[in-house]
Amino acid sequence: GPGSPGSGGVLPQHRGHRLRVEADGVLLADLDRPVRQVSLSNARPVPDDGLVEVTVRYPSSSLRTDAEQEADGGRGASPTRVRARAVTVSGRDFHYRADTVVAGPVRSRTWTVQPGAWRLTLPRAS
C-alpha cells in the first residue's frame, strides 16, 4: 500500500501531486485537487476482513493556492478514509513506496487485496 513507514503508497510532495484515486470504483480524489499522500494499510480495524484501509491526505492550507482552496469547496486538509478491496492511483509519473522500497515512476498502479495470500506455519505446540 502507499506512503507511511511499513506500508506502501504514493510518496508525499510539499505542494501535492495531481492524482486520481479510486477505491472499489468510487472516486476519492481527482486531478483537480492536489494529493499529498495516499496510504494503504491492513493493520486495522479487522486484519482478515479482506479490506484495506485507504487514507488520502491533502496538502496543508498554507501550501495551497487560494484557487486550490476554493476548488475543494472548503474541505481543507482533512484526510479521506475508506475501506476497500481494490485501490487504483493514476496520474503523471508518480513514485510509490511498498514495504520501504521506492518504485516508479509509473502512471497507474492498482493494489488488490488477496485474502489468505499470506500464510504463517507455526511449529506444533509441545
Image (cartoon, grey):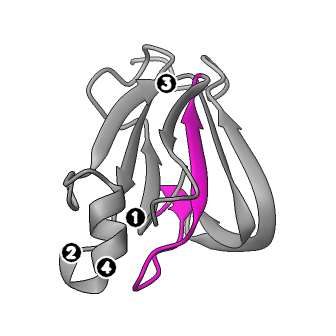
Residue underneath mark 4: 64
Q: Residues within 10 Å of mark 2 (few under 14, many from 20)?
A: few
Q: Are circles 4 and 2 on residues that touch, CB within 8 Å? A: yes
Residue 49 % position (x, y): 43, 13
Give the CA distance from mark 3 to mark 4.
Answer: 28 Å
* Kind of element beneath mark 4: loop
Give the CA distance from mark 3 to mark 1.
Answer: 18 Å
Q: Is residue 93 magenta?
A: no
How many dots with numbers?
4
Q: Residues within 10 Å of mark 1 (few under 14, many from 20)?
A: many
Relative height, residue 58 to residue 109 (above, below): below
Could you tell me which residue is drawn at 66 percent across and 23 percent down? 114
* Kind of element beneath mark 3: strand
Residue underneath mark 1: 4
* Kind of element beneath mark 2: helix
Residue underneath mark 2: 61
Between 48 and 86, the residue placed more toward the observer is 86
* Kind of element beneath mark 1: loop
Foreground label between 3 and 1:
3
